[in-house]
Amino acid sequence: MADLSPAGSGLRTAQLDGRRLSEALLPLELAPRAQLRLAAISRWNALRGVRVGLVGLALLFMLIGANLATPIYSLLQQQLHLTALDTTILFAIYVFALVPVLAVVGHWSDHLGRRALILPAVALAAVGDVVFATSGSFWQLAAGRAVQGIAVGLSTGAAGAALGDLLPDRPTLAAKLTLACSAGGVALGPMIGALLAGGPDPLLTPFLLHAIALLALCVPLALVHPRMPGRNRPPASPPRITTPAHLRPQRLRLPRTGRREFLQAAMAGFISYAVFGVYLSLAPAFAAKLLHTDSKLIGAVVAALLLGSSAVAQLLVPPTADRLVIALGMTGLATGLGLVVTAQYTGTPALLFIGSVLGGACQGIAFRSLFTTAVAAMNPERRGSELSSLWVIVYLGSSLPIVAVGALVQAYGLLPAVSGFTVLAATLCAALALAVARKPKSA
């Protein structure tokens, strides 16, 4: 297993009067007892399966929270007089907060350890829930979304890297869990939000209950010892030193190895998350118009179909290196989007559901295969940093495209705006499918 010590791995070693400089940067309970020879508060040396479960739950819970509000936006629009553009801006603010954090601190978990970022991120996500739940204006909602974005930015690279550390002998499973928890959280968020919003206080109940769940998760995360079992290290080796220089913001760089795989996975993720973002922000209104219903749950189910199908495909379908299968997956995403738009033009609800499931399943197969290949090519010592770079590109797909579509909705109406976006997204899917299908020059 990998070492989740605050110093990380791969750093130069040195002596510093028997102490590590990182002691000045972190609480002592975050440091491995064997290396610092200090009593630690967190003594629970949990099994690998427990650690995998805790990391997966942290990622799942935070992404559920980031999407709880999807079915509630219609109610917020009525109470706070928000426009369609305001709603899409709220989606984008989450990403605008998330991306800089990923870019600035994405490499920290390689030096400080994975839990040193995951644990405060989970606590911060609970704070974001409280801010959002007590909001009475657009700017308070924006602040809550920003806090949620910062929390997810802190943990995204660290959680994916932690799963890779915990499962070095099963990289495919690590990638599967990372993407399934991400897509699953985004899919479950709207449905849970719709179910909890059926109570007497639809704006308060979902977020307070979610905050309680996050704080409960903080307990085992704080108790588990941050050194994974099974890491063999010579007892006499000097401690690794983490200096402030290690934590300075770094320029985002492409990996030294596997750049083609990295770029293809990043492009697939960018397109996918643009589609997901538009779908989550506008699908409830789209479904309400087509199905002639104001039910928040039905709107949430339609919004979750695309993400849920993606998560199920990532869990059940083995990843493949077959370029044709991956290319067909991106083509299937474009086809699914086309069916969704056709459903509105023809008044055929069945096409809405078929297109959502088809697009989500095909996206899940294609993206997970590309993501698994890209992660396998990364240097384990820089996995946190390189994964953060990948997620920065991916999450950018959830920012400007959504704001642009929101502006088009306000100017031209829902169907023309979604139709224009679909044409552009389908064109990008086709271009990526061609790039994936083409053999590398070295082949």
Image (cartoon, grey):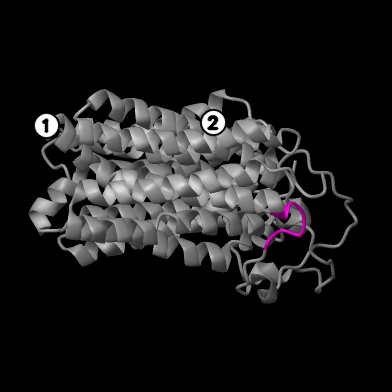
Please tell me whether residue 318 is drawn above or below residue 345 in the rendered image: above
Q: Mark 1 points at which residue?
A: 292
Crowding near the residue tagged with mark 1, few <14, some 14–19, many ≥20 C-alpha atoms within 10 Å: few
Q: Is residue 422 visible?
A: yes
Q: Give the range drawn in magenta.
A: 254-259
Real-space Cα separation, disc 2 to disc 1, in angstroms:
32 Å
| Dot 1: element | loop
The x, y position of residue 259, in whole percent, is 71, 55
Residue drawn at 49 percent across, 49 percent down:
428
Left or right position of 66 against 297: right
Main secondary structure along the magenta-highlighted residues: loop
Residue drawn at 79 percent across, 43 percent down:
231
The one nearer the camera, 4 or 190, is: 190
* Amino acid beneath label 2: Gln
Q: Indicate the quadrant where residue 112 lies.
A: bottom right
The x, y position of residue 378, in whole percent, is 73, 51
The one nearer the camera, 434 or 256, is: 434
Please tell me whether residue 201 is drawn above or below residue 122 in the rendered image: above
* Amino acid beneath label 1: His
Quadrant (top left, top right, bottom left, bottom right) of the C terminus: top right
The x, y position of residue 343, in whole percent, is 26, 32
Crowding near the residue tagged with mark 2, few <14, some 14–19, many ≥20 C-alpha atoms within 10 Å: many
Examine the structure image and report whether residue 292 is included in the region drawn in magenta: no
Left or right position of 334 against 237: left
The x, y position of residue 435, in whole percent, is 63, 47
Q: Name the residue under label 2.
A: 314
The one nearer the camera, 171 or 114, is: 171
